[in-house]
Image: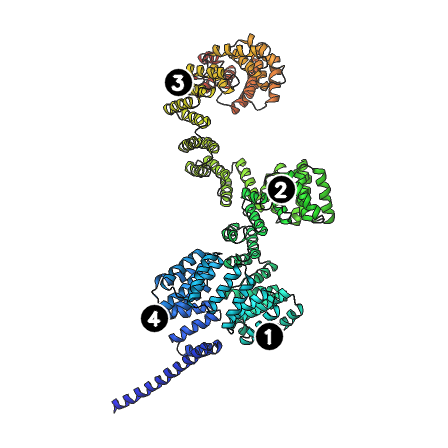
Amino acid sequence: MRSRLKGCLLGVMLASHTVVFADEAQSYDDALTSFVQGDVQASYLVLKQVLRDNPDHLPSKLLMGRILLIDGYVGEAIDELEEVLLAGGDEDLVMPPLSRAYLFAGMYNKVFSILNRHTLSDDARLSVTLVAGTAHIRLNERDAAVRLYTRTLKDFPDSLALLNAQTNLLIDLQRLDAAQQILDKSLQLDPKAPFTLLAKGKLVAAKGKTKQSLEIFREAYAIAPENPATMRAYAGALAEAGEYDHANKLIADIEAQTPGDVQNQLLKARILALTQNQLAADKILRELTERLSLLTDEQLNEQIELSLIAGIVAYLNKNYDMASTELNRYIGKRDATPEQLGMLTDAMLRTGAYKDAAKLLEKNEELVVKNLNLAQLNCELFMLLKRPFKCEQLLPELTRRYQGEEQFAVLQAKLFLNTRKLAAANEILRNELADSDNEEVLKLKIALLTDRRDFASALTLAQQLLTRFADNIDYQAITADLLIRNNKLDEATVLVNTILEDEPGSVPGLVARSRIQYYKGNYPAARRAIDDALKMDKTSVAARVLAAQIYLASDMTESAIEHLVAAKTLDKKDLRSRELLLNIYRKEGNNKAALSEANALLAIDRLSPDYHLQKAAILNELKDAEGAKTQLNMVYALWAKEPHKLMSLARFQRRAKDFEGAMKSYETAIRLVPSEPLPYMDMAAFQIKQELLNQAQLTIEEITQRFGPSADVSMLYGDLAVARGSLAAGFDFYLQALQQDSAFTTPLLKAFTLAKDGVKRQALITYLSRVTASNPDNLFGQNLLADLHYLNNDYTKATPMYEALLTSDKLTRRAFVLNNLANIYSLTSPLKAMALIEEALALEPRSAALLDTKGWILALDNDYLGGLGVLRQAYILDASDPSVQYHIAYTLAKLDRQQEARELLEEHDTLAKQFREKSDAQKLAQAL
């Protein structure tokens, strides 16, 4: 009994499940039938019911994913399709729609992953390949798409879809011959295939044969008169040919066949624009507005195509906020056309959404490059948003498409100016645009000339521009600014007054007025004008920078810094504000802040040698030797082919103690210009400095062998001899250099330094006596000769020579001649000595040597405390001078402070040094 009852219950349960399964299967079948018949909404409603009852029904989930994708709910579609895949769904069924969903979502790597990681059936592989090709195109990887299609065609040479995709892509790349070859294969397979004919028509149109292309589109339409693609292509061709009535009739047929067809609505709007038929446009607007007003928000969201219609209506009605919202919603779910993209971009710009507009154009790059107006707008937005590199990425494709067109040349010049590629901008303006009187071209030429500081030429063009557009206040301001920079301040003042009379709050006018006063040195008036300008516009970077310059000139550094910080905040890529801040911080010794600005400048312009050198100097001061070396290596890379700059770099590297880098720079310079002696000579001098004496000798010998003897070579031999401790030999080489070139002052000064220390002093006196006797105008030689007599304590010869020198207006070292005379007279005529030293100090008030002389004169005149005070000032300026040390010790001894005097001499080891009064200092030390 129990088993029979159990069997009955089981039968009831099975029957119940059979009914459920049958209902579920029937519902899915109904949904699938509706879907195949194009009734997507009915299919969606049935599937919704099925999945509510059985959320795991995989066929329904797969079909639901496809419907959600069609309606534009890409994220929801991906969720459904991925769940089917995770539940074990067939990859060949799931991957084609899932790849399209990834494409619409911009998840291109996932599209490529499907193709690369899964083994699919032929049909599925072909479907995903076409999607992957589109993904490459959207990434502007068109060559990659061509390669993908080419590889796949080897396996599927008879796939019309693949052949047509390759043909269309090659046409877009302007590779028309290659496109023709692929098209020929398609035509061999099926010359009457509608999509093949569409590709053929596109290729013929690309070759400029518009009439022939119209006939091909007509043929495609005749074969498939009810296919929306052939109908739209034919209607578009008719519109381009000016056959608006015929095109409108065809549009009406599309409308009758597929009411509300999105592309048809767009084509209709396009024809209205072409015919400027305002009445008809108003009629369609009214019809569309009424139609949309009957829809609920939910219906609008469910039918994504209606967003496009709503956007078009809003745009034509100049409701740009609504147009932006609806068109953006639609384009976010669908592939855009150039017309849609242009309409949405314009709507965004009209509402001030510049960044969003730039992102939109960037996302739809493949369409942007097909339309020069869109491309120019895109680039100008990127430049406005300080992202010109994005425009540079488009340049190769734009060059291929538009090279030779003036509009494109203007775009290139503008981009090159923006990215500081001034030579490239100049090349275009001087060649392609040389004869253009286009307003935009004149502005670009003015900007370039101004940047190159050719203010005179820039002013000429600005005045031409102002003649054509006399009432343009911007051009008035540009002209005024250039008048100022040409120091035509009166003319500039007249023009600025005109600007401010017409528009008292004109920021450019107020800035120009401030600049005039700044140039005149009237800083209070300049500050007032620039402050007025900044009240009107706090966001003007140019005004902020000028304000900083004015405040710096007024010694108001903190205010200047405030303006510069504001300027760099307003424009993170403004170079001038950061350069000024860097200079201020370095002068203040704030190396950490200076380093921050150097890093910011390098982030803007990584190829600037000057910024790398400045950063290296800062790091060197911060004792970061490795960091400084890294920066100098960067400069080496930038200057690797410029020998003279490499030599400058080597000297910088020497100061930074990057000796290895310096040697590398010298060696590279020599390799680049082996016929020039200067790099060899600099390297030899460096080797001597580094005590690489044997290497230096080899280098000097090579110089002699290559270029022959010279005064420079003799001086190098002298430096080498001195470095080896052969001072007399060194002196002889210096004298030899002077005999080879008597006007060469460097070896003379080196010989004088040795003579001053007692090395062959009389030989130099003999040489200078002969030279000055034959050339009475040689004041420099006479001064050195007088100094040698002074060092010999031969005042009877030194005094008349110094006094004769003071009678010349051309004497350059007057203060020091006066100083030596004062020293001579200090023992015999203190009053005369004091008068001479006061005259000298009037010329050089911060000279340690002169203060030392004054203090010594006071001490010798028994004013020990007064003398000690002045000598202390000299010591602060130069504590290493043995004469100052001796004079202070002498004065301390006279003040009965013998221990301090002795400690001072011992601390500095004064007696070990060579100086004129050394014998007197030795006597003092013995007395102490």
Q: Earlier in the sequence, mark 3 or mark 2?
A: 2
Q: What is the C-alpha distance between the residues marked 1 and 2?
A: 58 Å
Q: Earlier in the sequence, mark 3 or mark 1?
A: 1
In the image, what residue type sits under mark 4? Gly
Residue 830 shows in this picture = no
Which residue is pictured at 56% across the width and 10% down the height? 773
Residue 143 to residue 555: above or below: below
- Label 2 CA crowd tier, 10 Å (few <14, some 14–19, many 20+): many
Residue 452 locus on image (x, y percent): 59, 39
* Residue indicated by mark 1: 291
Of badges 4 and 3, the one in the foreground is 4
Q: Which mark is residue 918?
A: none
Residue 579 to residue 679: above or below: below
* Residue indicated by mark 2: 546
Residue 448 locus on image (x, y percent): 59, 43
Are the residues tagged 4 and 2 within 8 Å (C-beta)?
Answer: no
Horizontally, residue 625 falls left or right of residue 343, namely left
* Residue indicated by mark 4: 88
Secondary structure of the residue carrying numbered label 2: helix
Q: What is the C-alpha distance between the residues marked 3 and 1?
A: 103 Å
Residue 167 to residue 756: above or below: below
Q: What is the C-alpha distance between the residues marked 3 and 2?
A: 56 Å
Are the residues tagged 3 and 1 within 8 Å (C-beta)?
Answer: no
